[in-house]
Image (tube, rainbow, N blue to C red):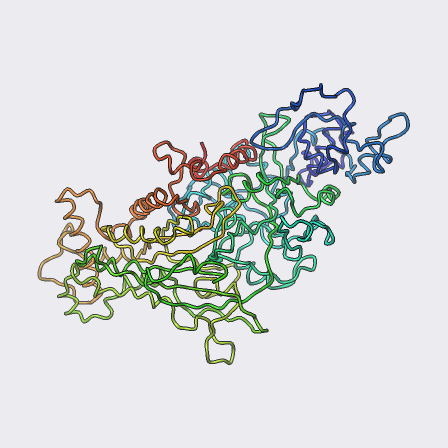
Amino acid sequence: MTEDSQSHGDDDPSGDGLPLDRRDFLRTVVAGAAMDRNMADNALLLDDTDRPAAVGTETPQGDTSDPVAKREYFPVKSDFLSVRGLAPDQNTSVGGNVWRSGGVFSVADLASEYDVNRDAVSVRELRTPQSVGSAMSVDQLGWDNWLDDYEREGAEGVEVPPGGDVSQLISLVNQQTDGKFRGVGSGHSHSEAAVPEDLFSDIKNLEGELPRPWLRDPGDDFWDPKKDPNRDPPTRDHLIRLRGGTILKKLNRKILPNPGVDGRKPLALPNMGAWDGQTLAGAINTSTHGSGLGLGTFADLVRSVEIITVPESQYESDEPHVRMFRVEPSDGVTDPRKFARDAGTHDMVLVQDDDIFHSVVVGYGSMGMVYAYTLELREPFWLREENTFETWGTFDPYQEAQPSNNRHYQFLVNIVEPQLDVFTGTAPSNAPAPLCLVRKRNEVSARGRTPTERFNTQNEVEKYVEAFLTPYTGFDPSKLKNLDFSVALNRVMNFNIGDLVAPDPPFKAPPGGTRGRHETASYIALRRKQDLNPNDLTKAEPPVDTITTEIAVPASDVVPAVDAVIDYVLNNPRLFPAPLGVRFTAGSPHFFSPEYGRETAMLELPIPLPDTLQQEFDDVKTHYDTPPALPGQPYLKPKKIFFQKLKELNQSIRVAKTENHDNVGPGFLDHMLSIDVAKAELEKLEDKLVRQFDGRPHMGKHNTVDTSESRSYMQPGNMYPEYDKWLDAYRYFNHTGTFDGEFTARKTP
């Protein structure tokens, strides 16, 4: 083998590079190098019974150790292989095409037998399994998330080319191995999960559906559930391969409802969260969820993930090597023979291993840059939505959430009304039980109907913020001016949870109809609010600025956990002006998912951060201000009167605490004026639920999970039984630290 002008090596910036399986094959041919045996097995379809012992390499009797020590954190068997060791047994039909008389072995025939591409190759290509292209220019300076609480002013953004050609992506990652690099999506996370250190790429250009050339054949026993009663195989016709930057809104409204690549029939997501502006990779990497005790998270839809990594090298320990893997469970959907024989079209190594798969899928962007996922979805379906109002303590949410009772079940707890009673003199123990909005969605037949959109209702946080900021509109100025807010706050503000569902039925009438519906397509019903731009697939309006924490507790503990939240807010000097949301999910097999290994109730407490509140406070003066409000010059407009009294009440509580040397904290609204104060409040609740209920914080929301010694119960190793396996996979795939950031700084040792 010689240098050749046709080579696709480092010297040709336009080349796609050789497939990794072929490089491994050629590397072994040239040097008999140490390599991962399963990579050779996947490429050549050999197992231990097919491969004869290499000449002169018999293992001494009683010595069962591997020639190369097995890596505990990446369970792939490794040993030294000779070219002869790769060949099939001489007595097989395949071996007859490779071996010649006299024990002569033909490398060329072996390559031909297994369809290994035989184009000329340079020695440089054998040295490193990576594609190198032309340098990509910086197109963005600085990064921040949607709340602007996580930002990197000096971070440089490199554009992912439209269409997301995989060779360009490998080249992109290869060029960033000297710095910290992360792929970023919609920036909707409330945590440090997506924060880049040095370099980042917005993956939203990495979108769309891809062919599925390597699936096992339709007649393969793999798909037949009758062949093994202990297996629940996927349904082949329900599989779809998608690039990781695909926006969920486009997926729901354009890609899935229509026939697709390779004759794919229309499909639908079995479940989804309340917002569809996320990228697929963002939703999966953070284990985003909807509600349904019999339904998993987004991550649980994954059957295969294609990820570009910078793993530990078996060959040169001090140099970064960019590799692309297709990772699946041990009984994966990919046919290894097809995958190997198609090696000339992809730059991937197939890994079918349960532990590695369940580590990589929920990796929070820390193991590499995902190119594509193969998901198992379902046929399109409709849902019927029913909304009822029930007093907390009068229903059993865990039983109601059972899949035999409801497919999708969730509820909101109106914690603000009893808080207002406590604020105006009622003892917490005597506060009335809160009213809950209970939402049930169950599958119905579409009956050939055209789906209609949700009526234009606000989501729960927006509605409550409006109720908080605009109650003055119903008051005569003189009455409002004479009202003592400290004893009448519950009369001023009306947080009616019934306002969250208006009108009823929740969905619009069909064209020409006069009555609304309770039924529509699943992707509309599962969305929290009406999509104001359903035909603009690039726009999914974000909710009002809100910081939240969400804690996963065992589903059977949902009642005492909700009681603990109610007790917390009723005995807290701050007002929490948004309802507590409760959703349910099935247990997840993915090691770093909050739902790992158990049925889960997700408790989410939001704190809104309305810019207008600070603006309204700035526009009025009280006698606590410097300079103070002038006496004898009262405000005349209800809006000014309202915000002056509200600001004065907040300041009076703050001053009283200071005078009494009370360390409880600031005024009852200060957490709505400062995101740092809001986070501190959420952290207290997080601490309570983690300690009392073995809670696991959602790491895409605000959380304080870290590896520090100060709070052992917040260490991931004490929350997640298989954390060490996840950590080992992270150390292998991100060996050089290319994909490190704030998340890994806190979540790994």
| Residue sitting at the far front | 229
Relative depth, front residue between 709 and 213 = 709
- In the image, residue 250 lies at what x, y percent? 55, 59
| Residue sitting at the far left | 632
Relative to 711, does residue 543 appear above or below in the rendering?
Answer: below
Residue 423 falls in image quadrant: bottom left
Q: Number of marks in the image?
A: 0
Left or right: residue 383 compared with residue 220: left
Left or right: residue 240 compared with residue 430: right
Quadrant of the image containing the N terminus: top right
Residue 543 falls in image quadrant: bottom left
Relative depth, front residue between 559 and 70 = 559
Relative to 217, does residue 735 appear above or below in the rendering?
Answer: above
- In the image, residue 206 lies at what x, y percent? 58, 50
Residue 641 falls in image quadrant: bottom left
- In the image, residue 230 lies at what x, y percent? 62, 48
Left or right: residue 192 compared with residue 31: left
Would residue 552 be visible to someone looking at this image? no
Relative depth, front residue between 497 and 400 = 400
- In the image, residue 390 lies at what x, y percent? 35, 65
Left or right: residue 600 compared with residue 461: right
Relative to 384, does residue 338 appear above or below in the rendering?
Answer: above
Would residue 640 be visible to someone looking at this image? yes
